[in-house]
Image (tube, coloured by chain):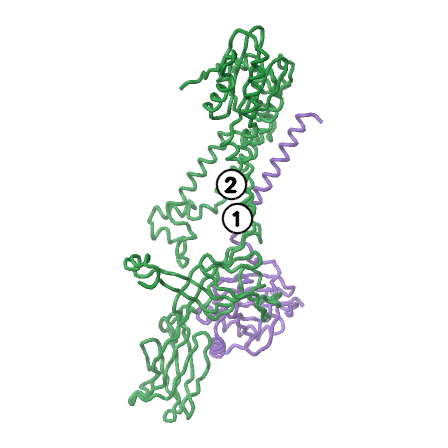
Amino acid sequence: MGKVKCECGHVNPNGTILCESCGRALTEKAKQEKLVDMRYEGSARRSQTYNKTIIDKVWNFFSSVKVGIWIIVLLLVAASFGTILPQEFYIPSNMPAETYYEDVYGVFGKIYYMIGFHDLYNSIWFSALIAALGVSLVIASLDRVIPLYRALKNQRVDRHETFMKKQRLFAEQEGVLQRGEMEKVRTELMKKRYKIREENGSLLAEKNRFSRWGPYVNHVGLIIFLFGALLRSVPGMYIDELLWIREGETLQVPGTDGAYYVKNNGFTLENYEEGEDPEVFDEAIDRVGTVAKNYQTDAVLYRDANNELPGADPELTEVQTESIQVNQPMKFDSFAVYQTSFRQDEMKAMHFALTNKETGEEFGGIVVDLFDQQESYDLGSGYKVELRGYYPDFDGFSESGEPTSKSPLPNNPAFLFNMITPETPDGEVSFAQIRNTMEPLGENEYKMAFKNLETRDVSALTIRKDLTLPILALGGIIFMIGVIQGAYWNHRRLWIREKEGHIYVAGHTNKNWHGLKREIHSVLNGTAIPEPEDRQKD
Amino acid sequence: MDKKKKRLYMRTAILAVLAGLVVYALYTNVTKESRGNLAAGEKAPDFVLTDLNGETHQLSDYEGKGVFLNFWGTWCEPCKEEMPHMEKLAKEYEGQVEILAVNVGESNFQVNNFAKQYGLTFPIAIDSGKEVMDTYGVDPLPTTFMIKPDGTIDQIVIGGLIQEEQVRALFERVKPSS
């Protein structure tokens, strides 16, 4: 396993196909070929040369472009499976995933869930595939860019004629190079910004070598991007929380460890009015009924000076007041609070009037706050209403006859009142709910007549912090630089050599052969130097 | 250094760094769901709450005693079932194991009414901002944290404790050994 010494005297790394210096073919296969493969300048891809230890084997596996392509194909196919049925994240949150998929999609859904496709993008094997792609990118790039760099750095001016003969653009003619003509060629090449090197009467003109680094710069960008995505899972780097907040409520901002509180001073939903607002919407309003103009939460942000212990009374100082609208988040520190959703007209309080059933006379009204009830409501002059029970989400009576609530949310509020009047000093019991009153302990003289309902809106805010964005942006920018570098510039070379009464001319570019041909034509036009011909005509 | 050796070291180092990153990524991905959730053996996070009588209770003040930290709601049926057992054993184990019943943010009226109805005498506090509940990562109700005299969590019990013996067994585990 030694070095390969070329006839020209240059010592090449083992596995080299074309001598880095003079370009002679070093392998039997390369000697047979009509045209040489110039992709990596015939350099030794190191992975293919050593395969002894387990480290080398792992390295070689990931170095293979074939393996890399397979990883990409597998990723694409796997990712597509996740789109067949909705992911677990998107199914209704009140349905358990175990049964949801089978209930909704039948046997297919059951299998889908069993395989684990319902949470595909968070699965360990999917993450492992992405990680494998990252590793493949790093190793495959390293394994190619270093030899390529070496080969381009070590290239000689006077390449061996066998190397030139096997270039795609090549011409050979008997004759000798004229000094005057060479001078003209040099000037022309310089005008086209070629860098010119000359040795022993041979000439190498080269430009835009950096274009060859494009793909590797591109890979560096991708790796930075993947690294940024990886950082998302580091605690504190990425926060994405949802907060439902009722009008008037002040709540801790999730994700801030209790340092901040936010108050909802009111939620507004505005629609475009027909005729009033820009007429462009009239047609849409006719078609769909309403077109929303604005979703807005008027929010106040507070800082809590007493947040060391959960449950401790907050000491709030106002930080900022802002109207949060869609795409107009409230920003503080590295957080942004977005308007995400809303629920209109949640029940807030109910108004009742103590009423004589027979005469219809009212003896005063009470307001029961559905979130903060009182034990009794005194109406004066001997009239009083006691609250015996409150069932925010009433759903019937238990076996023992007790009213039950199925949740703490005031979706279907019901009340057990005891009405005390001068005529009924012991009280009469009434069970009141919306549009329904029951008298569980016998006929009453009085009733609690439902008068009015107070409602309020609930706004949903998304609290987001993403410290990985600058890294993702950097990765993206470097990625694009790599793409541009490789796509908009071509690495072009022209070799001119005289040997034993023959003139050899060869040209190479990594892309856009037509452009190179035109350039060579204008340089060599009118000289005795033969113009190289394209020997790979389709 | 021998070139071959150098290459091997280089490759080993690069692969080690990459493997480290991959393992970290996979680990954080797998533990994402359970991150922040408490587990038995961990220190119970300190908190402070005011009970219905206006007395403040800070968890750290209970060091040296076992604590039965119960999260509950008035609408929750299994909560109703376990309350009488809790009431009975709170008296029996007085001074050894203390009960702290944390209501998950309902109104004063509802909680008072409930306490009256079931004749509860142990401290009941309302976690109006749900801060303690969030700190303890409580989701289904009732959830009970059994906290040992040294302040670490002995056990997390999700769901109702229907039998008195179950509650007694829990109390026995966390009572100070003396």
Establish whether labels 2 and 1 are both on one chain: no
* Residue A128 image label: 2
Q: Residue A437 appears at what percent x and percent y?
A: 32, 79
**Residue carrying label 1:** B30
Q: Residue at x 62, y 37 (%)?
A: B16
| Letter of the purple chain | B
Q: Residue at x 35, y 46 (%)?
A: A108
In the picture as drawn, the residue positioned furthest to the right comes out as B1
Q: Quadrant of the N terminus of chain B?
A: top right
* Disc 1 residue type (three-letter): Val
* Disc 2 residue type (three-letter): Ala
Question: In the rendered structure, the residue with mark 2 lies on which chain?
Answer: A
Left of B130 or right of it: where is A428?
Answer: left
Element under disc 1:
helix
Question: In the rendered structure, the residue with mark 1 lies on which chain?
Answer: B
Left of B83 or right of it: where is A96?
Answer: left
Q: Can residue B141 be spotted in the picture?
A: yes
Q: Which quarter of the figure has residue A216?
A: top right
Q: Residue A438 appears at what percent x and percent y?
A: 32, 80
Name the tint of chain A in the rendering: green
